[in-house]
C-alpha cells in the first residue's frame, strides 16, 4: 500500500537531479514560503530545504495530509513538532558526518596552532612567531558518539590524542567505554579540548553549562560543531572574554550571533558560519540518500533514518 504519492521539493534543481522519480511518485516544487496552492495537487511528503529550514518549517502545518518529512540536515530539532505526530520524519544521518568531522579537526588545529591569529598578522604584514599548543598529546573530551562522533574520533586518533567519549548514557560499545552526561563536570577537569557534536533536545540543551565550563583547565579549547544551544553561550562568553578558555564554534546560540556580541571580537574565539556539512561531499551524498528514500516511499516501505515513525509504525 502506497502511503506517499506526491512529494514536494524545495527547489527545481533538486527535483531535476532526482528525476525521473520512481514509478508511482509525483514530484512538485514548493519553497514553503507561500501556501501550497491547489495546483500542487495534495502533498503527502515534503523534503525540507537544507539552508534555513527552520524559517519555513511552520508551513508544514499547512499540509493537511502530511505523511512524511525528510530533512537534508542531521539535526532535526523542531521538525517533529512542526510535522505533527501523524507524519513520519527522517533526517540525513550519515550525509554530513565526514564533512563536519573534517571541519572540527580544522577548527581544533587552527585555534591550537594560532592559524586564526596568523591570518590577522599576515594582513598587518607582521612576522610574529610564537610557541603554540600542539594537538599531539592533548586529551579530548568528545560529546556525541553517533555518525559524526565516530568519524571525528577516527580522524583524531592519528594525531596521537587521548579521546574520552560521552554519550546519552554510560555503557560499553564496540569501541570501548562510553561515559554518561552526569560525569561531565568531573571529566572536564582532566581534558584540554571539549568537542560537542551533540544534537539538540531537552536533555542536551545547555548541557555544557557554567559548571562544566568552569571545570575545564585554564587554556582549554571548547569546540562546537553540533547545535549551538548545547553550550550555554552566556557562560562560554564570560570564560572566553576573560581569557581563561578558548573556543572554536561552527554553531552558536542565537544563530547568527547579534551584532556587537562579545564573541565576535574576542581574541580567544574562532567562529565559522555553520558550514560543517556544507561542503563538496554534501550534494552527491544527499542525492544518494534521497534516491533511496524515494524508492522506499514508492514501494510503501519505511524509509531510512526515521526519527519519528508516523504511518510506518
Image (tube, helix red, strand yellow):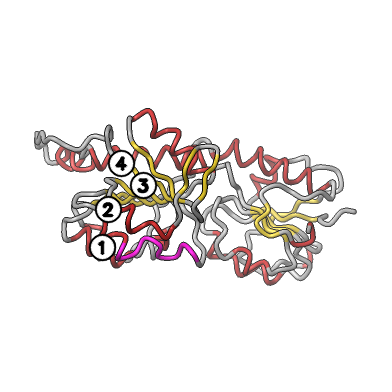
Number of numbered discs overlaid on the protein picture: 4
**For mark 2, does the 10 Å Cα neighbourhood hold few (<14), some (14 to 19), or many (20 or more) residues?**
some
Identify the residue position indicated by label 2 in the image: 189
Answer whether labels 2 and 3 touch (C-beta < 8 Å): no
**For mark 3, does the 10 Å Cα neighbourhood hold few (<14), some (14 to 19), or many (20 or more) residues?**
many
Q: Is residue 157 left or right of residue 69?
A: left
Identify the residue position indicated by label 1 in the image: 237
Q: Residue 193 location, x and y as percent? A: 30, 46
Q: Nearer the viewer, residue 222 or 9?
A: 222
Where does the magenta region start and end?
203-211
| N-term mark: 4 or 1 | 4
**For mark 4, does the 10 Å Cα neighbourhood hold few (<14), some (14 to 19), or many (20 or more) residues?**
some
Identify the residue position indicated by label 3 in the image: 141
* Cα gap from disc 3 to disc 4, whole angstroms: 7 Å
* Cα gap from disc 1 to disc 2, whole angstroms: 19 Å
Answer whether labels 3 and 4 touch (C-beta < 8 Å): yes
| N-term mark: 4 or 2 | 4
Q: SS of the residue at dot 3?
A: strand
Residue depicted at 37% across the width and 28% down the height:
158
Main SS, magenta region, reads: loop
Q: Is residue 66 visible?
A: yes
Quick check: is 13 in the magenta stretch?
Answer: no
Q: Is residue 282 above or below residue 223?
A: above
| N-term mark: 2 or 3 | 3
Circle number at residue 19: none
Quarter of the image for the N terminus: give it.
bottom right
| Residue mark closest to the camera, 1 vs 3 | 3
Amino acid at each position: 500500500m502506497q502511503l506517499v504519492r506526491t512529494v514536494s521539493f524545495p527547489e527545481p534543481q533538486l527535483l531535476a537531479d532526482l528525476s525521473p522519480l520512481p514509478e508511482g511518485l509525483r514530484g512538485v516544487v514548493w519553497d514553503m514560503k507561500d501556501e501550497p496552492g491547489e495546483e500542487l495537487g495534495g502533498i503527502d511528503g515534503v523534503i525540507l530545504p537544507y539552508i534555513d529550514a527552520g524559517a519555513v518549517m511552520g508551513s508544514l502545518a499547512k499540509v493537511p495530509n502530511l505523511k512524511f518529512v525528510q530533512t537534508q540536515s542531521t539535526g532535526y530539532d523542531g521538525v517533529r513538532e512542526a510535522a505533527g505526530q501523524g507524519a513520519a520524519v527522517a533526517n540525513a544521518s550519515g550525509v554530513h558526518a565526514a564533512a563536519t568531522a573534517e571541519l572540527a579537526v580544522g577548527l581544533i588545529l587552527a585555534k591550537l596552532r594560532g592559524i586564526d591569529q596568523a591570518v590577522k598578522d599576515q594582513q598587518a604584514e607582521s612576522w610574529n612567531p610564537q610557541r603554540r599548543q600542539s594537538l599531539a598529546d592533548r586529551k579530548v573530551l568528545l560529546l556525541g558518539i553517533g555518525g559524526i562522533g565516530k568519524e571525528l574520533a577516527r580522524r583524531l586518533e592519528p594525531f596521537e590524542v587521548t579521546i574520552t567519549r560521552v554519550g546519552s548514557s554510560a555503557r560499553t560499545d564496540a569501541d570501548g567505554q562510553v561515559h554518561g552526561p552526569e560525569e561531565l563536570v568531573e571529566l572536564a577537569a582532566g581534558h584540554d579540548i571539549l568537542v560537542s557534536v551533540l544534537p539538540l533536545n531537552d536533555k542536551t540543551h545547555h548541557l555544557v553549562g557554567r559548571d562544566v565550563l568552569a571545570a575545564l583547565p585554564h587554556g582549554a579549547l571548547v569546540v562546537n560543531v553540533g547545535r549551538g544551544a548545547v553550550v550555554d553561550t552566556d557562560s562560554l562568553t564570560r570564560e572566553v572574554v576573560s581569557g581563561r578558555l578558548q573556543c572554536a564554534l561552527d554553531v552558536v546560540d542565537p544563530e547568527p550571533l547579534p551584532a556587537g556580541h562579545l564573541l565576535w571580537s574576542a581574541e580567544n574565539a574562532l567562529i565559522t558560519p555553520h558550514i560543517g556539512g556544507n561542503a563538496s561531499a554534501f550534494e552527491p551524498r544527499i542525492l544518494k540518500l534521497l534516491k533511496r528514500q524515494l524508492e522506499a516511499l514508492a514501494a510503501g516501505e519505511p524509509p531510512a533514518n526515521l526519527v519519528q515513525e508516523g504511518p510506518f509504525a
